[in-house]
Image (spheres, rainbow, N blue to C red):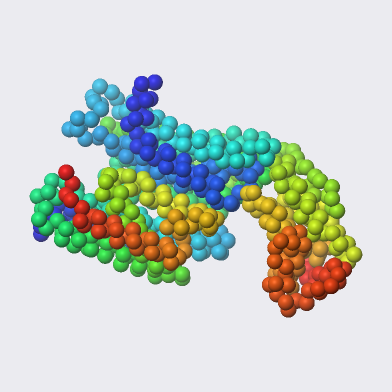
Amino acid sequence: MSPYFRARQLSRALGTVVVLGLVTAAVGSRRIPALPPGFGQEYVPVISLALMPVIVGVTCTTLLESPARTLERTSCRGLAAHRSLYALIICGLAIMLLLGAATLPEEKPYLLVATHFAAGTGLSLLITAWLSDTFAWLLVPTYALLSLMVWQAADAWRPILVFGPYPTQWSVAVCCALGALGVATHVTRRPRE
Amino acid sequence: MRSLALALRASWGALAAPAAMLAAVAYGLLNNGWVGAWMETAQTAVNAFTLALPLIVLAAGLDAQRDSDVSSPLYPGRGARSGVVITLWRWVGITSWMLAAFIAASATLLITTWGRSDPIEFPWLVLTVGVGWIAAHTALGLALGAYLPRLGLLIVAAVAPFLLNVGLAYGTGSPSALLTALDNGVLAVGTRLAPEAAARQLAWFCALTVGGLIVATARRSKPWLGMAAAGVMVGLGLVSVLTGPGERGAPVAEEKQICAEGVVVVCVWKEHAYYLPALRDVTDAMVEDLDTALPLPDRVAEAGLALSDSSVSFYIGTQNAGPGMLAEYLAPDLVRWLACEGTPGEVAVSDDVLVRERWLAWRAVPDALPPQAFDETHGIPEGPISEQVDWFAAGLDGACAPL
């Protein structure tokens, strides 16, 4: 195993993703009988399944970040390849677990889960290209939560609320673009100084 | 003052507080789930901070982990100070930031109510509960930050407090709702936060704050003390849930209404006087000419006001409701009253009833599409208004199911 993967403690990272996948399955399949059916049994699980992929995405960003910056410089020669492979492993496992969690509720919101994970990861990776991942943790989940809570009431703002509870063609396109841009930025970025 | 300035500078609250304020204000102003009376506005302001909950806990946790590396040149030199002082210093820093954000967000939302709503009473208690809720969660964040590794803190702070708070608040008025600031819909106009419920909530938040600070401080020196404090907190929470009523809303001591004369008398809570002129016009337009075929109510009154058999009660469901929305809210209750002639009863939803509700609303807001445009199978006469009124009345015969 190369120093790149050894430094990242691959098994620990995979374990983290698995735990988060299980949490997503647990909260996303939960029904709230005390609330009106339209809200407690449909909207709340959708919200849970919409928010958790964003958290998983930001977590993946932290896992993709190098724990020791000097290691990136020393393995500079194959850095893009290492980063791509590592991102594929972590994000691939995460997306499989999230899609698995999406099979549990009746609505099966596969598209919602996949797009929110892509946008959460992409947005966080873009932020961490210039700032510390702490900024991503502080800003991205709050933005996602805000999008989810006001989406139904704020028709005019929907184009900028990419983490809405129901995917539209526009939000799917934006989420996919953010995901692709974030991963591309991460893979091609120069080693941190 | 210098210590406070340093605490503010050293806190992640500098980033988290503006983000929290913006999120809370956006939620409050964009989400039309509240009507605009002061008590409800204050509750909306407190609940809007739900969005900031991950930020509050996360920023506090990161503050607890800041400069914890004793080999770092930024290490604050704890040898000279006790752990208690350091923890309190950090708590004051992050809490000050978050309280500033909370005050700014609450003021923004209350200002939107200013001038159009004469408060029955200022919602001090609700806002105080919000302050206690924030203070408790910053202490919890510090405790989490003291024990968890960085990645664990990031994940737990983003997920657990939000799920826990929302989970505890499920079921309006449930006992567990006392352990959280969230409990939407309890403080509608005409209700106030029950003082005993507020006292129990504040006691719980104080216990949580003190317990969280003890747990955060005791990590290195006295871990058993932290365990004991955590145990006391859980115990107090259980006692709070298991004892006493769960109801948080209580009726205001004195009913204050304001009425306007029209075809029928229209009354709203004094805090909703802003809606009265539009509501009177809407009601007049709806009931005008109906008396040729149906008995009319004496009074149309907002939900929560005292009623008689000859009163129609209805609920203003959203902030800044214009004539169209008011007509939409009033029409179903008016149809129910007319069908049941004032006696308690329900009207089953059917196409016949829906098209009559739409016809009533259209009379009040002629700019809206006429009901004929939606459904031509219900035989709405094109002729004079008296024929339309007869058609309307005929469709309500037998529609009422007595309770």
Residue A120: x %, y % from top left? 35, 56
Q: Is residue B319 above or below residue B335?
A: above
Question: Can the viewer see residue B13 in this picture?
Answer: yes
The outermost residue toward the front is B367
Q: In which quarter of the image is the C terminus of chain A?
A: top left
Residue under the point 86% across and 62% down: B289
x and y percentages locating residue B292 in the rendered image: 90, 64
Residue A34 visible (yes or no): no
Task: Classify residue B80 by image quadrant.
Answer: top left
Q: In this view, does B6 lie to the left or right of B137?
A: left
Vertical placement of B95 versus A193: above or below?
Answer: above
- Answer left or right for B391 relative to A71: right
In the image, residue A11 lies at what x, y percent? 20, 58
Q: Is residue B214 left or right of residue A159?
A: left
Q: Where is residue A153 in the image (x, y as percent from the top left)?
A: 55, 55
B173 up-or-down from B42: above or below:
below
Residue sitting nearer the eye, B81 or A154:
A154
Q: Residue at x 81, y 74 (%)?
A: B381
Q: Which residue is drawn at 63% across and 49% down?
A: B319
Choose top left, top right, bottom left or bottom right for residue B53: top left
| Nearer the observer, B274 or A156 | A156
Q: Tally the numbered discs.
A: 0
Q: Which residue is drawn at 54% across and 42% down?
A: B45
Q: Residue furthest right?
A: B292
For residue B290, what is the image quadrant?
Answer: bottom right
Q: Quadrant of the N terminus of chain A?
A: bottom left
Q: Above or below — where is B398 with respect to B16?
A: below
